[in-house]
Amino acid sequence: MTTFYLVRHGESRLDLAAGGNLKGAERGWAAHIIPLTETGISQIENTSKSLSTEGPQIVISSPMSRALQSAAILSRILDLSLQVEFDLHEWICGWRDSMELVGETEAEMRGLGGEWPSGETRDWEPMSSVRDRVGRVLERYQTFQCVIVVCHETVILSLTGKRMGFAEFVKLKK
């Protein structure tokens, strides 16, 4: 059995995506490339202390900048290899013109229990799809005893039903 520590990335610079610093950011693409704040860096550094005693063997990460930067910090401090896994990316919610609309879409998804109504489709990814794609990634790492997985709140929610704060983690055994 493998123990996976699902770690949410540290606090990120959402002000860059919402502000005028990145043109086109209001359409959502910039949220995928924004870095951590100084607080977010400190959060992940503190998380590394808790994880160091658990015997991790590898760090795997979402390719999105906020998760990848968090994973790089963990990898450096814990002296572990880092593997980027595309399918650990954030929940897909279609094309939205603002972070406010992303929030509204997330509220719709949660209101529907994470799944599309029977016979209907939406432009957002149902939680069953998130679980399936992330599950396929985790299966590839079941030769390890302990794996750190740096990803996103909705990804963690899909697997555990738990909402996570920045740099918080939860243990999952598979």
Image: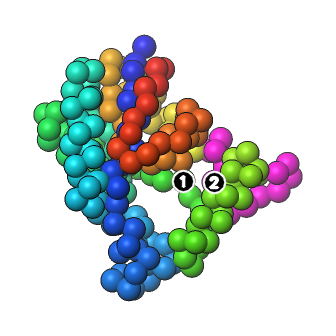
Above or below: residue 133 compared with residue 29: above
Residue appearing at x 40%, y 64% in the figure: 32
Q: Which residue is mark 1?
A: 91
Taking the image as shown, residue 17 lies to the left or right of residue 100, namely: left
Query: Mark 1 and 2 residues: CB-CB less than 8 Å, in contact?
Result: yes
Find the magenta span and give its range: 117-129
Above or below: residue 97 compared with residue 88: below
Q: Earlier in the sequence, mark 1 or mark 2?
A: 1
**Residue 7: x %, y % from top left:** 38, 39
Q: Which residue is mark 2?
A: 125
Above or below: residue 45 compared with residue 20: above
- What is the image's colouring? rainbow
Taking the image as shown, residue 7 lies to the left or right of residue 55, namely: right
The amino acid marked with disc number 2 is Glu
Element under disc 2: loop
Determine the image quadrant of residue 80: top left
Taking the image as shown, residue 59 lies to the left or right of residue 174, namely: left
The answer to whether residue 124 is seen in the rendering is no
Element under disc 1: loop
The amino acid marked with disc number 1 is Trp
Q: Identify the residue at the far top of this view.
A: 1
**Residue 105: x %, y % from top left:** 65, 63
Front-lying residue, 92 or 167? 167
| Tally of marks | 2
Front-lying residue, 2 or 111? 111
